[in-house]
Structure formats: structure tokens, C-alpha cells
Image (cartoon, rainbow, N blue to C red):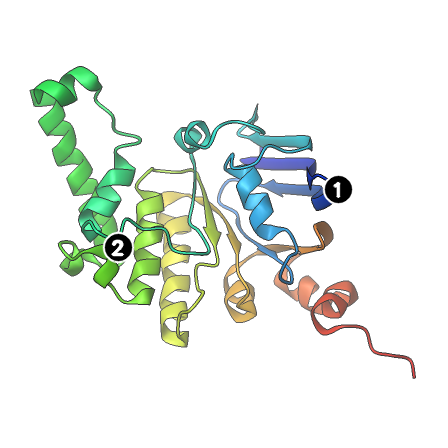
């Protein structure tokens, strides 16, 4: 059974068709990319996968269950997590508490235990903190755990957002422009981290990225969208050589 399956998924906003007939299948452990020029519909696909939008037509299946149109919190608890193109951290709280806040979505102990501070509550808090600190170590952020998130350099904020997404213990991780604004060394470090996530956690990863060197250097299969429609699907080598993809990015040469 595929982890994720999109079948003829379409999303319209009035007369505008943002995504049209998208088909996509991810097996467990896949590391895949979704690329295309600006306005191609990539982030709309992510919003459909995470419940921000409901599909106009078509089906979205996660581990055999149709999730199209579910609320975002319900999809998150099912095992889907994402980052955003524009960083959405909690700027006024610490690095550690950003991750802890996300972890509580999967580690709730109930109203009674929280209100009366029972032993169960404190045991859960200890577990959440330990899990959060392990993630911060993975992303080389542990020494900054008591710093407010707003004070981190841009690259560290990007990594913190991914760490926070992982705190929900997802099976499917969606990364929206994870390397945006990073320098070449930061991008290389991030590639190593993403590979490690897949190998150590058995995670399935789908990413959107405009940095073609990043995509081609990490993804094993790639889907290309143009004006909301898929025009190509294949390995990085196949995508590089696809005439439709070359035309979409570079334009078509005039015969004259």
C-alpha cells in the first residue's frame, strides 16, 4: 500500500484552476521532489495534502485512508507534517519550547492531568523535553535551546522549523522550500540532514524547492508541474533530459 496517493486531484478557485489532474504516488521511504516555475501550483498541492484546502475533485489517500477535505489538525495527528515557504516559528519563545509545543500534539495527557499537575503530567513533560532535545541535537541547535527563536540566524531558523515538524513524529514529511535563503554550505548540510531523516526514521519525504542543485542532488524521483498540470515524472536524469521540462524553465526557441 502506498503511503500517499493522489488520483486526478484538482483544485479550483472560482474560474481559476490552480491544480489540474495531479497524480502522485509515494511508497514508504521515498525521497521525492515537486518542482515547477513560480505559480505552478506546488504549494497548493501541499495545502491540499495538509487540509488547508479541500480538493475540488479527485482523491487523496494516506496509508489507505481518504483524507481529502479533512481538517489540518486531524491530518497532522494521522502522521503528516510540513514546513512552510515563509518561516512560521513562534518568535518570542525559546528554541526548545518551539519544538516542545509541536511535540504536545502527539503527547497529550488530558485536561485532568494538565490542570492538576499529576505524576502523569510531569512524566509526559519529561518525555516531551527529552525528545525535543534529541531533535535539537540532530540539527546542531542544542546549544541554542534557551535562545528566543527570533534571535537565530536565518539558516538556523530554517532547521528549527524542520525540527519542530519532526516533533509531531510524522510518517510523511512535506518540506516547502527548505533550502530557500541558505548559502551553499548550509544547503549541503541540510541535504545530509534530510538523508539522515529518511535513513534513521524511515520517513517518507516530499519537498518543494527552486534550488535545482539541491533537488537533483537529493531526490530519487521528481514530478514537474506547470500551470497546475503535471508535465513530467521520473528520476533526476530523466527530468534533466525531458524536452517539456527544458521548455518550461528555459522557454522554446523561436524557429526564426
Find residue 168 and report its horizontal and vertical position in percent.
33, 37
Q: Quadrant of the N terminus?
A: top right
- Extreme residue in the top direction: 112
Q: Residue at x 78, y 67 (%)?
A: 243
The reply, left or right, for residue 59 in relation to residue 247 is: left
Q: Position of residue 231 (x, y in %)?
A: 75, 55
Disc 1 crowd rating (10 Å Cα; few below 14, some 14-19, many 20+) is few
Q: Residue furthest toward the front?
A: 14
- In the figure, 250 relative to 237: above or below? below
Rendering quarter of residue 219: bottom right
Q: Residue at x 34, y 52 (%)?
A: 161
**Mark 2 or mark 1, which has the lower sequence index?**
1
Residue 182 position, x and y percent, is: 40, 70
**Residue bearing the label numbered 2:** 138
Q: Nearer the viewer, mark 2 or mark 1?
A: 1
The front one of 175 and 27 is 175
Whether residue 140 appears in this view of the structure is no
Q: Which residue is mark 1?
A: 15
User: Is residue 144 left or right of 228 when viewed as pictured?
Assistant: left
Q: Quadrant of the C terminus?
A: bottom right
Q: Which mark is residue 191?
A: none
For the residues labelled 2 and 1, the Cα–Cα distance comes to 45 Å
- Give the residue at the far right of this rendering: 256
Residue nearest the observer in this picture, 128 or 111? 111
Asked if marks 2 and 1 touch (Cβ < 8 Å), the reply is no
> Do we see residue 17 in this rendering?
yes
Amino acid at each position: 500500500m502506498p503511503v500517499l496517493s493522489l488520483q486526478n486531484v484538482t483544485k479550483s478557485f472560482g474560474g481559476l484552476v490552480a491544480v489540474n489532474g495531479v497524480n502522485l504516488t509515494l511508497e514508504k521511504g521515498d525521497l521525492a521532489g515537486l518542482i515547477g516555475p513560480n505559480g505552478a501550483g506546488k504549494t497548493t498541492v501541499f495545502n491540499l495534502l495538509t487540509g488547508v484546502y479541500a480538493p475540488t475533485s479527485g482523491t487523496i489517500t494516506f496509508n489507505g485512508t481518504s483524507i481529502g477535505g479533512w481538517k489540518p489538525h486531524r491530518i497532522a495527528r494521522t502522521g503528516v507534517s510540513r514546513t512552510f515557504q515563509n518561516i512560521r516559528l513562534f518568535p518570542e519563545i525559546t528554541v526548545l519550547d518551539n519544538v516542545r509545543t509541536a511535540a504536545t500534539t502527539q503527547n497529550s495527557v488530558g485536561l485532568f492531568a494538565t490542570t492538576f499537575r499529576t505524576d502523569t503530567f510531569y512524566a509526559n513533560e519529561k518525555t516531551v523535553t527529552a525528545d525535543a532535545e534529541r531533535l535539537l541535537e540532530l540539527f546542531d541547535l542544542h546549544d541554542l535551546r534557551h535562545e528566543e527563536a527570533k534571535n537565530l540566524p536565518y539558516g538556523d531558523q530554517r532547521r528549527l522549523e524542520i525540527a519542530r515538524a519532526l516533533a509531531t513524529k510524522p510518517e510523511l514529511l512535506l518540506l516547502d522550500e527548505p533550502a530557500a535563503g541558505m548559502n551553499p554550505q548550509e544547503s549541503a548540510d541540510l541535504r545530509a540532514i534530510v538523508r539522515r531523516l529518511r535513513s534513521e526514521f524511515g520517513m517518507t519525504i516530499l519537498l518543494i524547492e527552486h534550488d535545482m542543485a539541491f533537488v537533483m542532488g537529493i531526490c530519487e524521483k521528481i514530478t514537474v508541474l506547470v500551470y497546475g498540470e503535471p508535465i513530467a515524472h521520473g528520476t533526476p536524469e530523466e527530468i534533466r533530459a525531458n524536452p517539456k521540462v527544458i521548455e518550461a524553465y528555459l522557454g522554446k526557441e523561436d524557429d526564426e
